[in-house]
Image: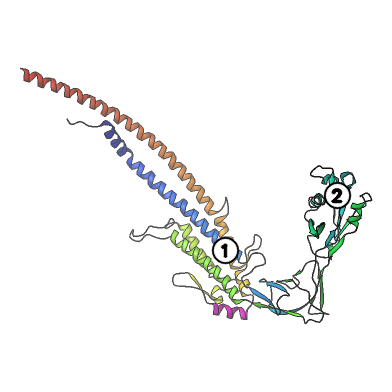
């Protein structure tokens, strides 16, 4: 009888014993992993599309875009949102808003004992107290201009309303106070009544105004039109239009004209963003539900999943619905032979010329309380899939995790079963090997005896 290895034979027999169950577990693990990966891909694709299209109509933005341009340069800048209306507007800028600045000269370094509190007051009625006694940060017993500036900036109720800084002019250091905001309400005054009489109080009381605090004054329609006065140089009196003036005009200057016009290129770009987002999502869903043909290509993770295939079909149905009395096709958005969307800009421009609100009417917007139009419908439908904890994807992921946990437990039990069978076979074949060895020795003994006789 030829020699054999008990370890090798025990391993081979134990493997064969559990092979069928091992193949089943491996196949189930692979299927569960494909599903888990597919769900991650599906969530990512739906979320990316949802974010892209919701962003097109969030806040003050919208699908239709406008441009705003002044007739003369250097007067200011302007932007127009989707809420604007095409038109022309005239302005005369009488004065710009300014933030107050005041400088203090010859502020002496004084002993801490002479540094009573001061109160910084603003024209809007707000104020804050500055504790000069605590301003001696280096502990030398006196209060310097740098320490006074630091105390003002770090005052508890300042909150950046007033900034104190030092400037050197002609070898002399001066304290500059600057208001953070523009307008008449930014005027800075100091209440020094708590300071003892002396050089520090005199210096604070003798501040020099560098820049006056004042509101912006602008005439809509030119001088004699509608007077607009406010603390900021940015005006939003015209719906959907934001204008920031940067230069005041001379009284004899002709009014500057602002033209607000529809920006067909930017509008088409927004529609194209929707198309691109949809086509990207469609490609992902096509790959996830792809059916293998003759085994030449791998099937998608959800090739036989009725729920995901229904999602794909529902998405295709929603984009073909009518919203606000309009369809995407009427706005130049049509499907190709493969189902992808494409844009006919000429048709889009023609529709918007006849119906300026067509894009807003059809696309609507996403909203937690009142979603409208195509985007609102898609957002609400995707929420059923994407909602954390209770959405379809979350539920499916939870189920897959349970399956994977059970497969791990099955693998652990099968590994234990393999070990038991292996040990049993190893013991049996080790005994058989020992018996074979004994039989070989006995046979050799008989052979020797026969030869000697």
Please give left or right for residue 176 compared with residue 46 in the image: right
Outermost residue on the right side: it is 197
Q: Residue 35, percent across and down?
A: 45, 52
The majority secondary structure of the magenta stretch comes to helix
Q: Please report the residue visible at 65 percent of the width from the left and 75 percent of the height from the top.
A: 67
Q: Of the numbered discs in the image, which one, if any, rests on residue 305? A: none
Residue hosting label 1: 52
Q: Please report the residue visible at 26 percent of the width from the left and 29 percent of the height from the top.
A: 429
Outermost residue on the left side: it is 453
Tell me which corner region of the image, top left, top right, bottom left or bottom right, holds residue 184: bottom right
Q: Residue 376, percent across and down?
A: 60, 64
Please give left or right for residue 96 compared with residue 300 in the image: right
Outermost residue on the front side: it is 171
Query: Counting other residues with Cα less than 10 Å from the Cα at mark 1, is it few (<14), some (14-19), or many (20 or more)?
Result: some
Q: Residue 94, percent across and down?
A: 81, 75
Query: What's the magenta region?
Result: 344-356
Please give left or right for residue 88 compared with residue 390 in the image: right
Q: Secondary structure at mark 2?
A: loop
Does 303 appear in magenta? Answer: no
Residue hosting label 2: 109
Q: Please report the residue visible at 49 percent of the width from the left and 64 percent of the height from the top.
A: 280
Q: Residue 396, percent across and down?
A: 50, 51
């Amino acid at each position: 009888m030829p020699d054999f290895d008990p370890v090798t034979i025990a391993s081979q027999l134990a493997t064969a014993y559990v092979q069928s169950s091992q193949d089943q577990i491996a196949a189930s693990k692979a299927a569960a992993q494909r599903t888990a990966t597919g769900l991650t891909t599906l969530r990512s694709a739906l979320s990316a599309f949802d974010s892209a299209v919701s962003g097109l109509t969030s806040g003050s933005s919208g699908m239709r875009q406008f441009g705003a341009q002044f007739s003369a340069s250097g007067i200011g800048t302007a932007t127009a949102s989707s809420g604007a209306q095409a038109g022309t507007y005239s302005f005369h800028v009488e004065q710009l808003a300014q933030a107050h600045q005041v400088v203090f000269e010859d502020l002496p370094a004084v002993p801490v004992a002479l540094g009573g509190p001061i109160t910084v007051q603003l024209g809007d009625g707000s104020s804050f107290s500055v504790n000069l006694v605590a301003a001696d940060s280096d502990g030398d017993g006196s209060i310097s201009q740098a320490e006074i500036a630091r105390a003002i900036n770090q005052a508890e109720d300042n909150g950046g309303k007033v900034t104190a800084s030092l400037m050197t002019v002609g070898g002399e250091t001066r304290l500059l106070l600057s208001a953070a905001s523009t307008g008449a309400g930014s005027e800075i005054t100091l209440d020094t009544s708590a300071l003892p009489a002396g050089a520090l109080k005199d210096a604070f009381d003798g501040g020099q105004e560098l820049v006056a605090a004042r509101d912006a004054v602008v005439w809509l329609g030119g001088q004699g039109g509608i007077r607009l006065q406010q603390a900021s140089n940015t005006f939003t009196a015209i719906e959907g239009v934001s204008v920031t003036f940067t230069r005041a005009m001379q009284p004899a200057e002709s009014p500057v004209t602002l033209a607000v016009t529809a920006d067909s290129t930017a509008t088409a770009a927004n529609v194209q963003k929707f198309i691109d987002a949809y086509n990207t999502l469609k490609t992902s869903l096509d790959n996830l539900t792809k059916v293998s043909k003759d085994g030449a290509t791998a099937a998608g993770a959800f090739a036989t999943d009725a729920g995901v295939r229904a999602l794909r079909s529902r998405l295709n149905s929603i984009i073909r619905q009518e919203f606000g009395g309009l369809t995407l096709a009427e706005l130049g958005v049509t499907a190709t032979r493969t189902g992808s969307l494409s844009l006919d800009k000429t048709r889009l421009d023609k529709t918007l010329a006849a119906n300026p609100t067509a894009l807003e009417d059809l696309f609507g917007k996403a909203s937690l309380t009142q979603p409208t139009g195509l985007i609102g419908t898609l957002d609400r439908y995707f929420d059923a899939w994407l909602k954390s904890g209770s959405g379809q994807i979350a539920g499916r992921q939870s189920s897959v995790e349970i399956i994977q946990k059970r497969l791990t437990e099955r693998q652990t039990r099968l590994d234990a079963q393999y070990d038991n069978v292996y040990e049993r076979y190893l013991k049996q074949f080790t005994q058989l090997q020992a018996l074979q060895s004994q039989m070989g020795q006995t046979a050799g003994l008989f052979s020797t005896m026969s030869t000697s006789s």
